Every structure is written in structure tokens, then in C-alpha cells.
Amino acid sequence: MTASNPLNDEPARHLGSTAHLLHSISSQLADRLRLVHLDGGRRRPVQAAVPPALVLVAHGSRDPRALDTVRALADLVRALCPSLPVRLGHIELNEPLLPDTLAALGGTPAVLVPLLLGRGYHVKRDIPEMAADASARVRVAAPLGPHPLLVETLHARLTEAGWRPDTAARGTSAVVLASAGSRDPDSAADTRRTARLLAGRLGVPVVPAYASAATPTVATALRALAARGRRDVAVASCFTAPGRFATQCAAQAPGIASAPLGAHEAMARLVLHRYDQARAMTAAEPASA
């Protein structure tokens, strides 16, 4: 075997080193050209878009359990989406109030997700007016109801309270869906829609009833169901958190009364769904001149 001559290998090493140097220079030049527009202007490095903050908008209550509940729901939302900034604001009675939350965000865009279960005065007037005063762009999402995830939570709370109707008992069973009530006909339509969805899930009649501003009341609905032979009636609390109305409605139940919706995973997923819907609507809007 003939040994290689180091003197003969020298030109090859030199050519290889030169090729490597030329390749390195070409790569660096290409990287710099990527930062330059065709018109000679320098490109800015692409940065990841920062998502708008998610602001949970609660009504507020003098019941201390209400604030604890919406805080726990906010924590669940954060757990499902850790990268998303989540804040809390109230319409009244509790701090932080929504205008203070928006002021603290400064120029950060936000999506407001009402922790309300249908269209009504707060959704149509109060929250949009507060949003209009914000210094940054703010989008108001749809209320939580009606939606299958809301019904999933109602069903879970009824089950936790002991709701176990078997096939033989369905002829005498029913549920009263107790809600806050509103004079707005859209709010009543949303509650009726939620009642129909829940009835489909449970397989028994579900009658909407209200704590104020609308009819029938819970007591009236219970009497009407009893007159139809529905003796085993549960009250489903269609309230986001504990409060005066939720307590009053539950107290009228002849048997089972479920807890308010509260900090349930399905509620957290519904909050994020409304947030995503509002963001999608914002992205679809034409840019303003």
C-alpha cells in the first residue's frame, strides 16, 4: 500500500478550506438579505403576536361566596390556558370593578367574557359602555348561555345534588330551571333555549322560572308541574355563583336543589370558547383606514 504524501494533500486541504469560507460568507449574506425589502428598507424581525387579555366580567354580589367562586373559575381558566393573561372585573358590588380592571390593563387589548347566562341589559348596555371607555381595543364576547357546555355543567350539578331519575320515574319527574330573570325578551328566549337543551339531556320536562323581573316564578312553576302529576321535581340553579337569588330559589325546592354553576371545568372551557369566538370575529373584521 502506498502511503499518502502530506505535500500532495496540501492543495486539497487549501481548496476545502476556501470552499468552506465561501459557503459561510454566502450564508451570512443570505441572512442579511432576508431582512431587506426590495425597496431597500430593512425588515423588522417577526415577533409572535401577544393575545388579548381575557377579562371575566362577573355581576358582583354581597354574598362573600360569589367572589370566591368567580376567582376559582378564573383559576380554572388559567390552568387550561397558562399562557393567556386572565383578569377579573365586576359590574357592581365587588372589587375590582370592570372599569378599574380595564384601566389597569392600559393599552393591552382585551376580550370581555360576561359570566352571565343570557342576553340582557348588562350584556347589551352596561358592559359595552364600560368597554367603550377603555384606552385599548376591547371586544365583548357573547354571554355563556345558551350552550351545550352550560347544559353539561347544569347536569353535573344536578347529579352531584342526588338527581337519579330511573326510567320508571320519568313520568313523574321534572326540573325547574331557576334563573335571575330579565325584562329583555332575548334573555327569556336564551333561558328557554337552555331549558330545552337540558330537557333533551335529562329526558324529562324542564320549565324555566325566574327570581325577578319575569314569569313564571319558581313557586308558580312548581305548582304547575304538580298539577300535571310531576311530583318529583328538582330545582336546577342557573346562576354563575351563590347569591341572594340563587339562595331564594333553592329554598323553594320540594326536594333536590343543585348548587350554582360555579368553578366547573365545563364552565372554564365555555369561557375560553367565547373568548376564541370573539377573537375570530375581530380577526374577520376589515382593518380600519
Image (cartoon, rainbow, N blue to C red):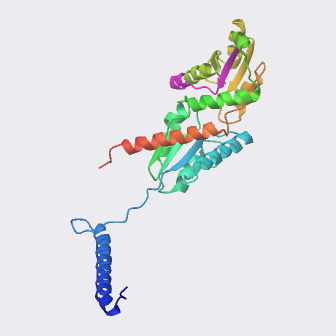
| Residue 238 makes an appearance in the image | no
**192 magenta-colored:** no
The reply to whether residue 43 is in sight is yes
Where is residue 83 drawn, in percent x and y? 55, 54
Q: Of 25 and 254, which appears nearest the observer?
A: 25
What span is colored magenta in the figure? Answer: 173-190
The residue shown at (72%, 27%) is 159
Q: State which quadrant residue 47 falls in.
A: bottom left
Q: Position of residue 157 (x, y in %)?
A: 70, 30
Which of the image's four quarters has the N terminus?
bottom left
181 is within the stretch colored magenta: yes
Position of residue 35 measured from the top left corner of the image (x, y, whole percent): 31, 68
Vertical order, 197 against 86 (above or below): above
Q: Image quarter for residue 201?
A: top right
Task: Decide if residue 36 is on the left or right side of residue 196.
Answer: left
Instruction: Return the residue found at the far bottom.
Output: 7
Residue at horizontal 73%, vertical 16%? Answer: 166
- Residue 113 place in picture, x, y as percent: 54, 41
Q: Is residue 65 above or below residue 182?
A: below
Q: In percent of the image, x 72 and y 9: which residue is there?
A: 226
- The structure residue drawn at horizontal position 60% and vertical position 46%, both measured from the top left corner, is 77
Q: Is residue 221 left or right of residue 1?
A: right
User: Relative to the observer, which residue lies in front, 220 or 195?
Assistant: 195
- Tell which residue pokes out farthest to the left in this image: 39
How many discs appear? 0
Camera-nearest residue between 3 and 7? 3
Using the image as rendered, state which of residue 230 and residue 10 is in the foreground: 10
